[in-house]
Image (cartoon, rainbow, N blue to C red):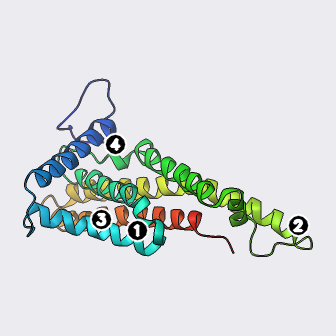
Amino acid sequence: MHEAPLFFHISGIPPHVTYSWVAMIILLSVAVIVRTSLKIVPAGVQNFVEVVVEFFMNLAETSIGHMGMTFFPLIATLGMYIFVCNFLGLIPGFEAPTSNINATASMAIPVFLATHYYGIKTNGFGYIKHFVGPMRSIVALPLMILMFFIELIGHLARPLTLSVRLFGNMIAKHKILMILGFLAPWIVPTTILGLGVLVSLIQAFVFVLLTTLYLAGAVEEAH
């Protein structure tokens, strides 16, 4: 979605794909810079990256427990990638890849698949206990069946809610910036850009937090 000319535009390739490549190049470039200038006492870019990585590591370990480090690479990658994609939309001539539903769905679906893959891998056939509620007896069989279908619908809706929530917020932010840019070309947009950075950060965190909670729920033992 773009009303102004784009800084990068490759014929035949959708803008959200082009700018997702830009986001990946930015992340890879920062990783290479930090890797080639590692210091015992961190400073500059290394210090910032270490703070970000430690935040995601603590989030994974606190929420998921003993399997936190297993999911840390996925959680950290999603968090940093989504924030960079969101932030690109604030730069004139750039587009946020996350303002396209295809881009957000491409992240939500792997999260959905990983959740159930690791749930089955960790709990085996017992993973189905997560879907039938706390009461498991012949008397409660009708309630268990009802709970199973309710939980099934809830799990199938997760990739939809993950992708639409991020997509919707990025579209809304873009529209607000565009409208206020016409009304007050200098004063209001400067303030809203600050709000846009905050929204970009919060939406990346919400996506990662929900991903972490879904994974934690899948690998925990059902009681």
Disc number placed over residue 201 in the picture, else none: 3
How far separated are the C-alphas under marks 3 and 1? 18 Å
> On the image, numbered disc 4 is attached to which residue?
1
Crowding at dot 2, Cα within 10 Å, few <14 / some 14-19 / many 20+, comes out as few
The quadrant holding residue 203 is bottom left
Q: Nearer the viewer, mark 4 or mark 1?
A: 1
> As shown in the figure, which amino acid type bears the numbered disc 2?
Pro
**Residue 139 locus on image (x, y percent):** 92, 73
The answer to whether marks 2 and 4 mark residues whose Cβ atoms lie closer than 8 Å is: no
**Residue 81 locus on image (x, y percent):** 30, 52
Give whichever of discs 4 and 1 has the lower sequence position.
4
As drawn, 47 above or below 157? below
> As shown in the figure, which amino acid type bears the numbered disc 1?
Ala
Q: Which of marks 4 and 3 is in front?
A: 3
Q: Nearer the viewer, residue 38 or 165?
A: 38
How far separated are the C-alphas under marks 2 and 1? 36 Å
Describe the element under mark 2 as helix, strand or loop: helix
Residue 115 in sight here: yes
> On the image, numbered disc 2 is attached to which residue?
142
Describe the element under mark 3 as helix, strand or loop: helix
Q: Which of marks 2 and 1 is in front?
A: 1
How far separated are the C-alphas under marks 3 and 2? 44 Å
Disc number placed over residue 115 in the picture, else none: none
How far separated are the C-alphas under marks 4 and 1? 33 Å
Give whichever of discs 3 and 2 has the lower sequence position.
2
68 relative position to 31: left or right = right
Q: Which of 124 and 94 is in front in this view?
A: 124
Give whichever of discs 4 and 3 has the lower sequence position.
4
